Image (cartoon, coloured by chain):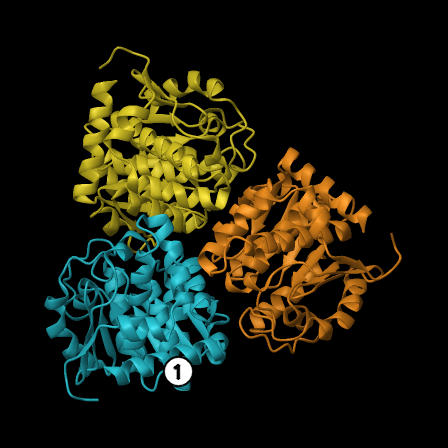
Chain colours: A cyan, B yellow, C orange
Amino acid sequence: MEQTTTMICAALDDIRAHKPLIHNITNYVVMNFTANVLLSIGASPVMAHAEEEVEEMAGIASALVLNIGTLSPPWIRAMKSAGEVASQRGIPVVLDPVGAGATRLRTETATTLLKKTRPTVVRGNASEILSLGVGNGSTKGVDSTRSVHDAVSFAAELAREHGSIIAITGPTDYVTDGQRSCTISNGHPFLGMVTGTGCAATTVVAAFCSAAPDPFLGTVAGLTVFGIAGELAARKASRPGSYKIALIDALNEIDGTHIGSLARIEENNNSE
Amino acid sequence: MEQTTTMICAALDDIRAHKPLIHNITNYVVMNFTANVLLSIGASPVMAHAEEEVEEMAGIASALVLNIGTLSPPWIRAMKSAGEVASQRGIPVVLDPVGAGATRLRTETATTLLKKTRPTVVRGNASEILSLGVGNGSTKGVDSTRSVHDAVSFAAELAREHGSIIAITGPTDYVTDGQRSCTISNGHPFLGMVTGTGCAATTVVAAFCSAAPDPFLGTVAGLTVFGIAGELAARKASRPGSYKIALIDALNEIDGTHIGSLARIEENNNSE
Amino acid sequence: MEQTTTMICAALDDIRAHKPLIHNITNYVVMNFTANVLLSIGASPVMAHAEEEVEEMAGIASALVLNIGTLSPPWIRAMKSAGEVASQRGIPVVLDPVGAGATRLRTETATTLLKKTRPTVVRGNASEILSLGVGNGSTKGVDSTRSVHDAVSFAAELAREHGSIIAITGPTDYVTDGQRSCTISNGHPFLGMVTGTGCAATTVVAAFCSAAPDPFLGTVAGLTVFGIAGELAARKASRPGSYKIALIDALNEIDGTHIGSLARIEENNNSE
């Protein structure tokens, strides 16, 4: 684990030194919040969704986020085009299947993006991840209604089938590439009081994937840093409005000492 | 009035216990804010506007908000489709005619939604409500430029004609179903310093309509709770940035003691 | 300079007294933030982008903002229509060429709007302004990657060619109408930690152009007030989340004393 926290600190330093451009095709609800989250951690956000420009933008970015939170057909086409360019260039693509399972449009879009774009990482709650396989998740809006444990057995299979890292977040986060797996017990219940904290975790994962040795470690790093920031914020604020502000502040404040003392990562295979 | 505050407290408890899913087809400006407002009060927000999915989403929601703040033709079609499903299912539909009277597109869309969707509740400022009847409101952007009193005489007529609760908000809020009526003198002038507080009141009304005995009481409950939260926030902050944060916090903090001591509701008919 | 600060204070008083309606066709990321910025300074924001209503909205506004931060073809058409009405009415039009130079769509849209709409003011960072002439800026997202000094020599030429005020913002802001020019050394590095502060400066410039004696002075006033607010905010907060809130608060708090004591404006020609 000390090796892992050292890697996380190095990736964080790298983000702050190089300010990687993270291209987000994301939902209207969280655009401002996730842009501020990326700036706070040290990355450079850009939000661009027009079919006429997403290929160029993905062509200069260090990572791409595809978030299906407020879908419409032109945006789906833009996600596919950007995803193709990103794959060709070998930059990380992180898919957030927001609300998959709640409507056919979301489930099908998420499934199609998974198959066609072959994202580097998929991050969702248990319901959303489950809906990617069986299409029968009972997602209630964008909240998690199925336990992480229900989805864990399915995630490794999904990871192997699609060659993607699968991350299931909740009280405990679970990350698998189909071989290696890892649980992260950071975070705070208050994160559930603020809209878009899942989306924010996704974009932080994208930033870390652009800086870490490999995307499995990048995903672990991003979720750990985001979770610890959630804990630091809870020391400052306990109501949703001020907690959101404290969370953005914490992503800026977080350093190696916080990571070294607070990270709770458990590797389930002896793969490191 | 004690009966009314008891009802409000019960509805608030119900929202916090059951976290009703509130489906919002709303404007880009306030999406993040109103989602956070709903989470803070205890409800579950979902924002979805694609014609391909709004019927399914309205099909699992406990209430629907139609807010015309940043209109475009596909969104108008989505509002009609979602409104139809919501009506069939009997869940509350709350219409916010943002800026009706300012442009023909807004006035016509609001009027059409009122006629075709027959919303359970319409909440607007005096200008917006007046524009629904005569189409000659002189709305200045989304601000109120006509007094509540000008619109009150018109609201009861409008309520009877369309079978909707009409709520006119301003320094004093006025709620009528065409028979019963009620004024609420909660709220704070600082609410005018923050964009989207009207839209936030609308979505809080939707949450309370899903939990109260009937939509008239739900509207009264939502506006009272939102207004009291505005007063609690003014104890903490007096500038617009920090006031907005304090308002979100207050919606989370508000409890039966606040409601019992601060509610200023006057029933104009002896209907309870 | 005392003459200039007196003009700025008068324009600020005028905004607070008359609450000019500022019509924004702007990007999704900053809509909520810039609406709150306008309310905080004392103006009335309206966000409207539908081709069906932008002409009417521009027809009742005191200034128009065209911000290309999240473009798509229907919005480009709406910008052209609104710009035409605004020009005919003689109200100020302020163009923010967000990310021009990063993609062909942005560079071409910005260039076309510059030529066809002949905006009163264009505000961008050095990269964005440079891309308007030569089309070869190496914009990295929406961040500035070229120094203000590189662009200054180009800006006067651009101003004369198009009859627009050109404002280049960065550590030092530079404003020119092709004859007169001016540097403003207000602002704070923390502004770079928050998304949309450039867009916010643009919309504040629009508000001041509606109130100042001429648009050159309006641009100087808007950038000075925004920069001083950035400094005031830095006295209250040093992390991005709370700094954003402090910035909105400061725009509400700022008064003649702050302006008189903190403005750092240097006029480069003896034109006043």
Q: Residue furthest top?
A: B270
Going 28% across and 72% down the picture, which residue do you hit?
A261
Q: Quadrant of the N terminus of chain B?
A: top left
Instruction: Give me the chain letter of mark 1.
Output: A
Residue A179, how many percent across, how many down? Answer: 17, 85
Badge 1 crowding class, 10 Å Cα cut-off, few under 14, some 14 to 19, many 20 or more, is many
Residue A202, how many percent across, how many down? Answer: 33, 68
In the image: residue C266, left or right of residue C116: right
In the image: residue C223, left or right of residue A8: right
- Asked if one can make out residue A92 in the rendered structure from this viewpoint, the answer is no
* Residue position for label 1: A91
As displayed, is residue B157 above or below residue A25? above
The amino acid pointed to by label 1 is Ile
Count of picture labels: 1
Q: Quadrant of the C terminus of chain B?
A: top left
Q: Secondary structure at mark 1?
A: loop
Going 46% across and 49% down the picture, which residue do you hit?
B29
Q: Residue furthest right?
A: C270
Going 80% across and 48% down the picture, which residue do you hit?
C2
As displayed, is residue B160 above or below residue A4? above
- Asked if one can make out residue C206 in the rendered structure from this viewpoint, the answer is yes
Nearer-the-camera pick, C193 or C73: C193
Nearer-the-camera pick, A243 or A166: A243
Residue B129, how many percent across, how many down? Answer: 44, 27
Going 48% across and 41% down the picture, which residue do you hit?
B194
Residue A47, how many percent across, how many down? Answer: 46, 66
As displayed, is residue C137 above or below residue A136? below
As displayed, is residue C218 above or below residue A127? above
